[in-house]
Image (cartoon, rainbow, N blue to C red):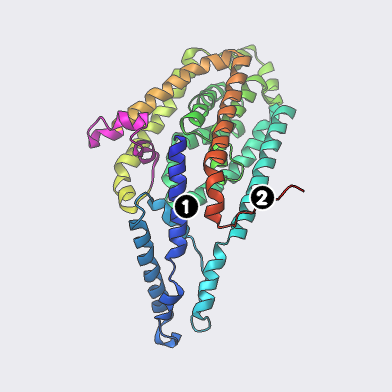
Amino acid sequence: MSGDAELEAEAARDRGQKAAINAFPSESSLASLPESPDAYTHTAFMHTISDMADLRLHDAFESAPSLSLDDLDVYQQLDVGDVDTSLMSRAKLKAMVKKQVTPKKILLRDKLAFVAGTVLAMLSAYWLGWSPTTFYRIYTAEAFVLFTLRWALYRIKKWHYYLFDFCYVANVLLLIHLWVFPHSAYMHKVTFAYAAGPLAWSVVAFRNSLVFHSLDKTTSLFLHWFPACVAWTERWHPDVHVREYNKKSTEAMAEWHDASLLDLVVLPMIPYLVWALLYYVKIFVLSSSRIQQRGYDTLFNYTTANPKSGVSKFVKQFPPKAQPVAYMALHVTLTGATFAVCKVWWNYYHAHTVFLLAILSISAWNGASYYFEVFAHRYVQTVGLPSKPARKKQ
């Protein structure tokens, strides 16, 4: 996504938030309701307010066609709690809603998230340098927390079909290898190809950003870059238990350290193709109608939505019914190409290390672009904080 596209997307989200907040019935609208809550049952009263809010939200979105359905999440997630209309006045109801989204709360949340993200990054970097043989432990702990949060949040946002994508499957296979089959040379090579191949290159393809205050961006970068770091440690700094196991047999030692192009391309391709077949059947056959009817988002929709992207240009050349097949064919081709490049990373320590640093630098550049080209121009207006005047020099 280009800088202009990010600015446009960020502006759309801002308008979505304002539309969502403004969608709640105004005081004049609430004034049209009878003073006595006895005239309504609890359900009827709340339905009336909900209908008024939905109508105003619909009007707001009609006037801003650049808004997406995902922008409705801000409105849908406003939690007013259990309301007892027999005891609560209209003013108290409105005040309760306003308390859910305030500039100070948003600012505090983002500050805490920034601190947590920074500490997490520093701890991970320190651990990688201090004890690369045990780096997989901190990866496992962070994966459990971040992936659990992502599943919960994506389920609410109707993005949970993203979790069927190959990147998540590759992370699961890596965790199985680390904790269930740590001595398997086959899984060592397969997970190396996945982590140093399509996962690492996804940082570039999806413009993953090093943005400390954003849980979503932090999780996306973790999903793709951390497995690549684990693969690096397994290749050049294997765990002490693995080294001791391999010392028992010359054949085991050779099998662990030697990998041909066949080992890094053909062998990883077998489980990958199994996933590709299951993914196609699930997304484009079994759940196709459900995804369209309920407005669920998928990676296919995301990558083909931008007419300027290479993926979209390639897929849209085909008839609509053939586009899913074209998309999967392109996915298989690009993934196989990244497998082949892994032979270089496997054979040369310095090339592998420079590659990881380059990927991290790209994510840092993407993060800097986001902060200075998008975030800095939108945050104050979105949160609603008054800008502070510049202090005069004494």
Q: Give neighbour class at mark 2: few <14, some 14-19, many 20+ (Cα, 10 Å).
A: few
Q: Secondary structure at mark 2?
A: loop
Q: Is residue 76 visible?
A: no
**The magenta segment:** 297-324
Q: Is residue 372 visible?
A: yes
Give the residue drawn at x 49%, y 84%. 86
Q: Of the numbered discs in the image, which one, if any, rests on residue 365?
A: none
Q: Of the numbered discs in the image, which one, if any, rests on residue 390?
A: 2
Q: Amino acid at mark 2?
A: Ala
Looking at the picture, tell me which residue is in the foreground, 269 or 229.
229
Of callouts 1 and 2, which one flags the residue occurring earlier in the amino acid sequence? 1
Report the Cα–Cα distance between label 1 and label 2.
Answer: 26 Å
Looking at the picture, tell me which residue is in the foreground, 168 or 273.
168
Compared with 369, 242 (above or below) is above
In the image, 362: left or right of 62? right
Looking at the picture, tell me which residue is in the foreground, 222 or 277.
222
Compared with 136, 102 (above or below) is below
Q: Name the spot of residue 8 as percent of width and height, x first.
A: 43, 44
Q: Of the numbered discs in the image, which one, if any, rests on residue 14?
A: 1
Q: Amino acid at mark 1?
A: Asp
Q: Secondary structure at mark 1?
A: helix
